[in-house]
Image (cartoon, rainbow, N blue to C red):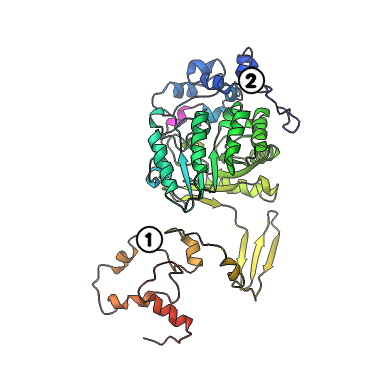
Amino acid sequence: MANAKNSPLTDEVFTRAPYWKDVPDEKWMDWRWQMSHRLNSVQDLSVIINLTDSERKALSAQGLFRVDITPYFASLMDADDPSCPVRKQIIPTAREMVSFESMMEDSLAEDKHSPVPGLVHRYPDRVLMLVTTQCASYCRYCTRSRIVGDPTQTFSRSEFDAQIEYIEQTPQIRDVLLSGGDPMVLAPKLLDMILSRLHAIPHVEIVRIGSRVPVFLPMRIDERFCEMVSKYHPLWINIHVNSPKEVTPELAAAADRLTRAGVPLGNQSVLLAGVNDSVRIQRKLVHELVKIRVRPYYLYQCDLVEGAGHFRTSISKGIEIMEGLRGHTSGYAVPTYVVDAPGGGGKIPLQPNYILSQGVDKVVLRNFEGFVTTYSEPRDYDADEIKTQEALIEPRPETGQDGIYGLLDGRRMFIEPQGFADVHARGGAEHRLRSGEQAQKWQPLGIGALEGDKLADGEEEKRQALADGEEKVGE
Ligand SMILES: *Cc1c(COP(=O)(O)O)cnc(C)c1O
Ligand code: SF4
């Protein structure tokens, strides 16, 4: 493979299996040709690679997740080696049919968190907008295999309208993430229309696209496409590369065109057994990415999704990979390792422990080499000094989602599981120690509502008493 640093950033063909050697370059580099010549059957694939029995069996099975592979991406497969990391991502094997405990159809409960079809509103200030179920090729471990690949599940014009209307009417949304499926396989006009409608919403500050098109179909990123997206800045794109083999001169050229069009690029990888569950491979991957100006963003733990059981690793493998990256290589090249919470809790970042211990004003830390150090904390730190400057910035409401930060910020003192109060009432009656008017005795003094929130009963008086410096006398 040519070194990306020296490779000419043109439409030259570098990646093409011998089978297609007679296809004229203009055709090969035409994304429409690539899309209409995708491979999906034993017949198609057996002329490109030597299929194993397990691959044949899965390719012939009914009801498995869709198979479709662009000739460009298929050219990256090793024809004779079933352990090829590219091949494993796109060719099914019989192991896909094995079920496992905890597997789900919608493991992130996305549909449950969708106020309208295809719009997942999980975080306070941003939404995930699914705009299609189609992709340029299909990844065997796809977290959305419940809808992806199935053209009948795709979103209608009226559903786009409902998604956009929801965003228009929800001013807390400042970031819209387009995904699918793959938004970059939409008809160019349709994507243009969606981007322009989002761009027109005053409270939407940024739009991002999650796409594997630059990896499966780099020729799609042509000048026209770049011109179109550059009308909608600030627009960010996250691509999806899992193995260093996918970083080809064609991908490098596509990334170069996008970054020249002003689009910052990130990468989201999935940690996959037998594909990239290795420190050495991950280091190589992140180095290849930063060379083409793609910033590693997330490394995902594989989801509990049907068909992906054989790709799952232990979480300890992910921690080990992070241990092998942080400090060992450029901070720019280190992604955040996340588990997307089963049941719909969103992304939870994980990393090795760097805090070894804590005392009154000391924190004992260790670095990547095992060097142990002490950070002495100031004893006279005034955390209120900043308040006048802070007051100049409007707070953003996060109704119901203040979370752990809300505990630190003094909005609440505890978060309790649903039904906690009932369980702990133990079926007992209201009695003299816990009658209605006694309830305030378990309200923490001075903690609770801040400006703008509704104050709990009796809270106002207590806060006033605090402010007045009144002494609280025993009741
Ligand atoms: C991943 C995701 C986002 C974006 O999360 P970031 O951490 O901001 O990249 C937003 N909404 C949903 C539902 C997601 O799964
Ligand atoms: S490109 Fe993304 S949405 Fe499409 S199959 Fe792969 S993981 Fe799923």
User: Which label is found at residue 54?
Assistant: none
| Front-most of residues 21 and 300 | 21
* Residue of label 1: 417
Secondary structure beneath dot 1 equals loop
* Residue of label 2: 16
Q: Which residues are magenta?
A: 91-99
Secondary structure beneath dot 2 equals loop
Is the CB–ligand 2 distance for label 2 below 8 Å? no
Q: Is residue 85 something that shows in the picture? A: no
Q: Compared with residue 245, is residue 403 higher up or lower down, i.e. above or below?
A: below
Percent of width and height locating residue 353: 60, 57
Tell which circle, 1 or 2, labels the residue nearer the N-terminal end. Answer: 2
Percent of width and height locating residue 65: 43, 29
Q: Amino acid at mark 2?
A: Arg
Q: Amino acid at mark 1?
A: Pro
Within 10 Å of the Cα at label 1, are there few (<14), some (14-19), or many (20+) other Cα atoms? few
Residue 86 position by quadrant: top right
Question: For the point 28% across and 67% down, which residue is it?
Answer: 426
Question: For the point 67% across and 34% down, which residue is it?
Answer: 256
Q: Residue furthest top?
A: 22
| Front-most of residues 38 and 11 | 11
Q: Is residue 468 something that shows in the picture? A: yes
Q: CA distance from mark 1 to mark 2?
A: 56 Å
Q: Is residue 93 magenta?
A: yes
Question: For the point 70% across and 54% down, which residue is it?
Answer: 369
Q: Quadrant of the C terminus?
A: bottom left
| Front-most of residues 239 and 183 | 183
| Front-most of residues 316 and 148 | 148
